[in-house]
Each structure stands twice: as structure tokens, then as C-alpha cells.
Amino acid sequence: MNVTFLDVPGMVRWVTARGVENIVRDLTTAIDADFARWQDFDKTPRVASHSPEGVLELMPTSDGVTYGFKYVNGHPKNPERGFQTVTAFGMLADVGNGYPLFLTEMTILTALRTAATSAMAARHLARPDSTSMAMIGCGAQAEFQALAFRAVLGINSLRIWDTDPAAMDKLERNAVRAGFDVHRASDAREACRGADIVTTCTADKANAIVLPHDAVEPGMHLNCIGGDCPGKTELDPRTVAASRVFVEYTPQTRIEGEIQRQAPDFPVTELWEVVQGRRTGRESAADVTLFDSVGFAVEDFSALRFVYDAVRADPDVATVDLVAEPADPKDLFAYATAAAVVGV
């Protein structure tokens, strides 16, 4: 059985042809629509296998019609060895017969969906008059985040900081080429000064404080996406305690997010509640809102379905023969052994 297959070159061609900003703008709408039907989805914290080097994870969900999963790793020291910190692939399947529908790379797609989710949350939580964003961490996610916030919120002014000068060089170069106004800060405090939105995205697996508590100003929206596994945080616990905190799926975020260092009954609001109008987001211009994002399977489902719908009718998109289809469904043995004879 041939299954639609989007490999890395295919994903690159699709992203190049459609444009990152167009993709994340439309993907933001798709993710928002799935959060608006949150109750349709099976939900469980991701299945994680931790090691001293990093983590391997499976992120599954289903809406009863389609099943999706993502395999993803997180290895903070990988760049020192010439590897990426995060890589991924994913699949969609038909719930009715269990057959796969779509197989794709998700290293690039995860960057797109993370950026789209950040922008979607900010659209609900940030001040509507926001014009500038500080970026603490200038790694692989940074440009995607910047383009998503411009596409969805009109942010065109970036204040950037990273402990790695080469990462700052890379982001500054790419962002200026993309038309952003970029201020290269000397530290995190300077980066945050006057910013309306602060995005933190760092890789170290540690309970770090990359955003000083005294750098947080009234009215800021904090988009914290780097604290995404046990023992890995980016904020001072005082900042979390002083913010209105919004999460994707509480049982997962209490294990992995910024709130893992708070009491088990620390109050949070799940983002779907805001999307559906059940809870308020920002209540005043002075509120500090915090999107404590760890990434959740529904977002990957949205991204997988979004890309599948976009490419499956394209005659140039590849397929892969992934499922054996014997003429007699009960006689797999005859099919398998005949194939072996033919191959001799």
C-alpha cells in the first residue's frame, strides 16, 4: 500500500514554495481550530525515555477519525558533536482500519508548529498593541518564532540575547535579511528592556534562570518554550508565581514545564479554555501573562493534518510502499514467501 511520504527535500521544497510566514499564519489558525474542539481528542502526557544524554519521546493523540503521533528527541549537547538538539518524524493513520495515511519528517515541521503555537497563544494573551519582542536564546527555533510573531501579531522589532555569540550572529544575519529591526543586547536584562513580549528558548537541561525576575515588566507576555522536560526550566520561580500562567495540558506541564517547581495545586489555565471562551486570558494591560509551553500532541496532530491536506493531491509528492497487501488478508505467509522467491 502506497502511503503519502514527505521527506526532508520534499518538506524543504514545500516550505520554500509556500513561505514560512504564510505557513505559520495558516497553521496558527489550524491549531486554534483544534484547541476549539479540545474535547474531541484523546489526551495523555507524552511517553518519554530519559537518559543522561537527553530524552526520546512519543507524542500520540486521536480525534476518533484520525490518529497521529510524533517521535522526537531532545539532546542538549548534540550541537557540540555536530548533531541537532531536536529531530523528529511523524505519522497520521486512519482510525477506521488502522492503516497509515501520511509519513513525514518533523524536524522542520516541529519548528513551524512550535512557532505557530506560540503565536496563537500570544494572540489570545499578549497586549494587542505589542510591537517588540525580546528573544532569549538564538538557536534553531529563533527565526521561526520571529516570523510567526510578525505574521500573526505584526511584531517587527527584535531584541536578542544568547550566551553564544555565534548564535546571535546567525539570528541577527537572518533576521535583518528578513526585514526585522534587530537590537543586539549585551545581556538578558537589556534585551527585555521595553519589550512587550519575551520569548525564552534555551537548550540546557538544567533548572536555569535565563530571564531575571527583575527584568520582567508589567504588561509583558512571556512565551517560555525551552523548559520542556523534568529538571529543565528557564524562569525564576518568583516570576512564575507572579504571572497569570497558561498551559497546554496540565498533567504533562506539571512534570515538564516551568510549573514543575511550583506546588502541585499551583493554579493554571489550560489554553483551550481561553480559546473556547470559558476562561479569561489577559485581564488588564498590567498583567504579566505566561505561556508555559512544553509542546503537546494535539499541536503535532494539527501540523501533520495541515501538511497532509496541503500536499496529498500533489502528483510530485512521493509515496512509500509501507503496508503489505496480500490478495487474501488472512494469507500473509503466501504473500511473504512469494515475494522472497521473486527476489532471489
Image (cartoon, rainbow, N blue to C red):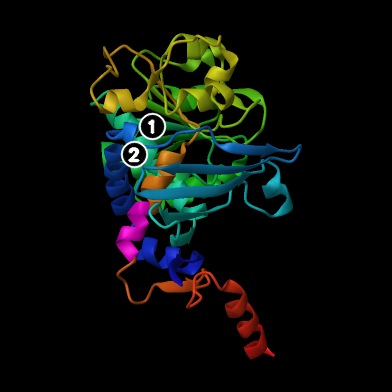
Whether the magenta-drawn stretch holds residue 246 is answered as no
Q: In this view, does 34 lie to the left or right of 328?
A: left
**Who is closer to the viewer here, 247 or 58?**
58
Question: Which element carries disc 2, helix, strand or loop?
Answer: helix
Q: Do the residues labelled 1 and 2 touch (CB within 8 Å)?
A: yes
- Residue linked to disc 1: 133
- Residue linked to disc 2: 149
Q: Can residue 145 be seen in this view?
A: no
Magenta residue span: 305-311
Q: Of the residues shown, which amino acid type is indicated by label 1? A: Met
Estimate the x, y position of residue 307 in percent, counting from the top left.
Answer: 36, 57
Q: Which of marks 1 and 2 is in front?
A: 2
Q: Of the residues shown, which amino acid type is indicated by label 2? A: Phe
Q: In this view, does 67 lie to the left or right of 283?
A: right
Estimate the x, y position of residue 207 in percent, counting from the top left.
Answer: 65, 23
Q: Residue 38 carries which label?
A: none
Label 2 Cα neighbours within 10 Å, binned few <14 / some 14-19 / many ≥20: many
Residue 310 quadrant: bottom left
Q: Residue at x 45, y 56 (%)?
A: 98
Estimate the x, y position of residue 70 in percent, counting from the top left.
Answer: 51, 48
Quadrant of the rendering where the C terminus is positioned: bottom right
Q: Can residue 183 be seen in this view?
A: yes
Q: Distance between the residues labelled 1 and 2?
A: 9 Å
Estimate the x, y position of residue 126 in percent, counting from the top left.
Answer: 31, 25
Whether the magenta-drawn stretch holds residue 310 is answered as yes
Label 1 Cα neighbours within 10 Å, binned few <14 / some 14-19 / many ≥20: many
Q: Residue at x 74, y 41 (%)?
A: 53
Magenta span dominant secondary structure = helix
